[in-house]
Image: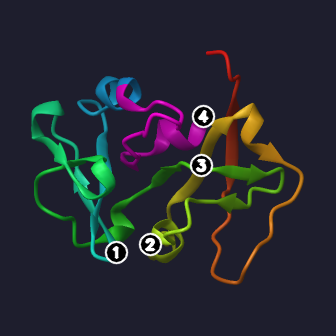
Amino acid sequence: LPEFQEAQHVLCYWSLPDELETAGFIDKWYKKKHIYLPRVSGDWVEVVRYEGLEMMQKGAFGIPEPRGSVITDPSLIDLVIVPGMAFSVAGDRMGRGGGYYDRFLPELKKAYRIGVCYRCQIINELPVEMHDVSMDKVIVFDNNL
């Protein structure tokens, strides 16, 4: 995607077993671009640069999270790749119910938001509330990859 090609600072996520796998993507790109991952701190998400697998530790909810310094300027992020339980054809997103992304994404003022999911996670409509943050684009992958 042109948005990814142009981005230098990309926030991704470390996938859970039922999410679109990201470890290979992160490993491929972290030496060519600045790749960041979220780290849960209470009710908030901190952003930490990924520096390799040896810098990961088990974090909140058993999800591997990066060790390291938190970036203090979220406007640095050009592009964010976001997981979801479901996405609508209009780009609305349903998360896991914790609200972490909905609280954090508004801080990324200039970041292009890309949702990624399997085809079975796309539905026509989702219930949307005022605080829900929609995606600029949703990329759909076949379930049998």
Q: Distance between the residues labelled 2 and 4?
A: 24 Å
The residue type indicated by label 4 comes to Leu
Residue 44 is tagged as: 1
The residue type indicated by label 2 comes to Phe
Q: Name the residue under label 4.
A: 1
How many discs mark residues in the rendered view? 4
Q: Residue at x 56, y 67 (%)?
A: 97
Which residues are the magenta region? 1-23
The residue type indicated by label 3 comes to Ile
Q: Are marks 3 and 1 in contact (CB under 8 Å)?
A: no
Looking at the rendered structure, the secondary structure element under dot 1 is strand
Give the mark toward the camera: 1 or 2: 1
Q: Are marks 1 and 2 in contact (CB under 8 Å)?
A: yes
Give the mark toward the camera: 1 or 4: 1
Q: Mark 2 points at which residue?
A: 104
The x, y position of residue 16, in whole percent, is 43, 40
Q: Name the residue under label 3.
A: 114
Using the image, determine if residue 37 lies above or below residue 5: below
Q: Which of marks 1 and 2 is nearer the N terminus?
A: 1
Looking at the rendered structure, the secondary structure element under dot 2 is helix
